[in-house]
Amino acid sequence: GAVVSQHPSRVICKSGTSVKIECRSLDFQATTMFWYRQFPKQSLMLMATSNEGSKATYEQGVEKDKFLINHASLTLSTLTVTSAHPEDSSFYICSARVPAGTDTQYFGPGTRLTVL
Amino acid sequence: GDSVTQMEGPVTLSEEAFLTINCTYTATGYPSLFWYVQYPGEGLQLLLKATKADDKGSNKGFEATYRKETTSFHLEKGSVQVSDSAVYFCALRGNFGNEKLTFGTGTRLTIIP
């Protein structure tokens, strides 16, 4: 099956710094990638939809200047958490959709962000 | 808006026991329904899906039937194994070309030998 990787798997940073998380589709081209956030014991919440070569579409309540998304190629999307604060600590998960008519999304293993 | 409610865990069962994880949904129109599984340290994987009423999705011994009359998509397995220990997520995707997945909170399942 299609494989999606994320890097890093976990990161600890100081408050006020920025952190970049990469999401890669390893064996397929993904025109659309999704970024989710998961709080402990809660569901995955969609943050934004990222389309290659165009601006991301953010869900209501998600600050686009806080969570910068770049989808510069068909195999890579990045999420940058700018000026991170402790409340940004969470589990961030990306997924990628295989094109050509399928509705299946393939998920990365997630990135645990801890902001001190 | 769309929502998914699934039974809270954690669920602990003995090997070879019967498993049911309840899932109900609220959505307009005719959504597609999914069960995803997340094994420790791995990303979510699609377990099974159903795209219209009365469809039954099945995979690896798991089954779920799309019941529009009860807006449910309960996950079942007749005899669970230790390797089934994971977190299970019920999800829906709305129709009208909307790609967004709406997830339930997940149910952690532990199977003891």
Image (spheres, rainbow, N blue to C red):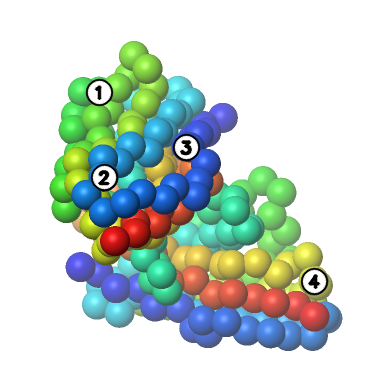
* CA gap, disc 1 and disc 3: 19 Å
* CA gap, disc 4 and disc 3: 29 Å
| On screen, residue A116 above or below B44 | below
Q: Which mark is residue B6?
A: 3
Residue B72, percent from left and from top? 37, 26
Element type at marker 2?
Answer: loop
Element type at marker 1?
Answer: loop
- Reading the image, the residue beneath label 1 is B53
- Tell me the kind of residue under disc 3: Gln
Which image quadrant for residue B87? bottom left
Q: Tell which tag, 1 or 3, sits nearer the viewer.
A: 3
Q: How many residues crowd mark 3 within 10 Å: few (<14), some (14–19), many (20+)?
A: many
Q: How many residues crowd mark 2 within 10 Å: few (<14), some (14–19), many (20+)?
A: few
Residue A89, percent from left and from top? 71, 70
Q: Are marks 4 and 3 in contact (CB under 8 Å)?
A: no
| Residue at mark 4 shares a chain with residue at mark 2 | no
- Tell me the kind of residue under disc 2: Ala
Q: Residue A86 carries which label?
A: 4
Element type at marker 4?
Answer: helix
Q: Do the residues labelled 1 and 3 touch (CB within 8 Å)?
A: no
- Reading the image, the residue beneath label 2 is B17
Which image quadrant for residue B55? top left
Q: Is residue B5 visible?
A: yes
Mark closer to the chain start, 1 or 3: 3
Q: How many residues crowd mark 1 within 10 Å: few (<14), some (14–19), many (20+)?
A: some
* CA gap, disc 2 and disc 3: 20 Å
Chain of the residue under the numbered disc 1 shown in the image: B
